[in-house]
Image: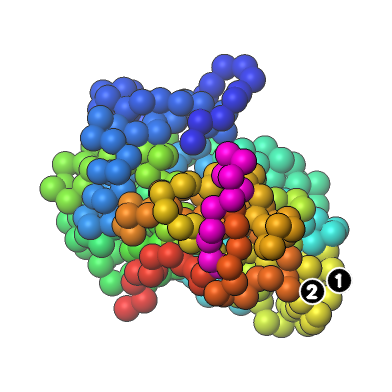
Amino acid sequence: MSEPTAGPLERTPLHALHQELGARLVPFAGYEMPVQYPTGILAEHAWTRTSAGLFDVSHMGQVRLTGKDGQSAAKALETLVPGDIAGLQPGQQRYTQFTNDTGGILDDLMVTSTGDHLLLVVNAACKDADLAHLQKHLSARCEIEPMFARGLLALQGPQAAQALARLVPSVATMKFMTGAFVTIDGAQCYVTRSGYTGGDGFEISTPADKADPIARLLLAQPEVKPIGLGARDSLRLEAGLCLYGHDIDTTTTPIEAVLLWSIGKERRVVGGFPGASVIQRQIAEGAPRRRVGLLPEGKAIAREGAEIAVDGRIVGKVTSGGFAPTLGRAVAMGYVEKPVSANGTKVELVVRGKPVPAEIVPMPFVKHAYYRG
């Protein structure tokens, strides 16, 4: 989970806390980020699946979008994304993507309506490009306010609600993909019941100077331990969730990525977003390839870039692969040609030059446990 970087690394508001907790810090998306703490990735993964893990995701980009002169920020944003944003009620959240003219994905993002404005959370590596994209296309219709200095904490796991509810009792009744303004330690924060582990949990947007004290308050709860990027990656892989720049990018469409569910039903027909004609054609006729889950035999781990073959013919590539601690075995996902994409199809993954038998299987690998009330 480390990446090469050019120039000095940025630091989140929790940098001193990570050092204090003994984190191993690595370059990631231009930031110095904790990949793990002394207990290690496997223990952190297991703790998050059974209790509550606290992740620093302050490197992500937060943006506030407000309509100008009575114009709708939601309608404006719909010119850039295929999601149903205008249909969001105050306090509702939605997952969507910025698309390009060929239907490719520029980034994926979360959008929450507060009633009078939208709150966007975009990926760290894309946030400057995303901001420029918003400014280029929407500045005449919207006030675009980057809030890149704010803290963002992800509290994830089956005991996340009881831990956070000690500080904010109202979060106990929030449902998956909803949000609300709350006060924590005297600071106004925005909390959504969401996350990227496939389990229950929350994301908490804080003022920059309150990220550290709020993180310490959460870590003082008996259910909560700090978790690094290593376990974040294994958790999202078990949940069958895409990582931008790996499982989705400008060369993949939402249909190929099996993200049709994220496109508004009316928008599938009406369009009005970049690449709509390509995406509409793939909805009608099927995409040429499809993202699939893969279960390799044995202990071999097929990493990103491993080729996928059927009867000796290359039919695709692995985009994410690793060990799934909850299952105690290797898993992977990748793209294969549509004719060989059915669940149950036998394939081979080329790992270090050797073919490893594998099977295409449904995702998620570990059942989602979102709280829907």
37 sits to left or right of 231: left
Residue located 36% across and 26% down the image: 24
Residue located 68% across and 66% down the image: 290
Whether 354 is among the magenta residues is yes
Task: Magenta stretch: give its range.
Answer: 350-360
Kindly report the secondary structure that dominates the magenta region of the rendered protein.
Answer: strand
151 sits to left or right of 126: left
Q: Position of residue 292 (x, y in %)?
A: 59, 65
Residue 282, numbered label: 2
Give, as a three-letter code, the residue at label 2. Answer: Gln
Count of number-bearing discs:
2
Closer to the eye: label 2 or 1:
2
Instruction: Categorize mark 2 by other alpha carbons within 10 Å: few (<14), some (14-19), many (20+).
Output: some
Give, as a three-letter code, the residue at label 1. Answer: Ser
Residue 370, numbered label: none
Tell me the distance, in whole angstroms, between the alpha carbons under discs 2 and 1. 9 Å
Please name whichever residue, 250 or 360, is drawn nearer the observer in this view of the structure. 360
Instruction: Categorize mark 1 by other alpha carbons within 10 Å: few (<14), some (14-19), many (20+).
Output: some
Seen in the picture, residue 107 relative to 162 is either above or below; the reply is above
Is residue 56 at least partly visible in the picture?
A: no
Q: Which residue is mark 1?
A: 277
Seen in the picture, residue 124 relative to 337 is either above or below; the reply is above
81 sits to left or right of 123: right
Please name whichever residue, 136 or 344, is drawn nearer the observer in this view of the structure. 344
Mark 2 or mark 1, earlier in chain: 1
Q: Position of residue 179 (x, y in %)?
A: 42, 63
Residue located 25% across and 30% down the image: 38
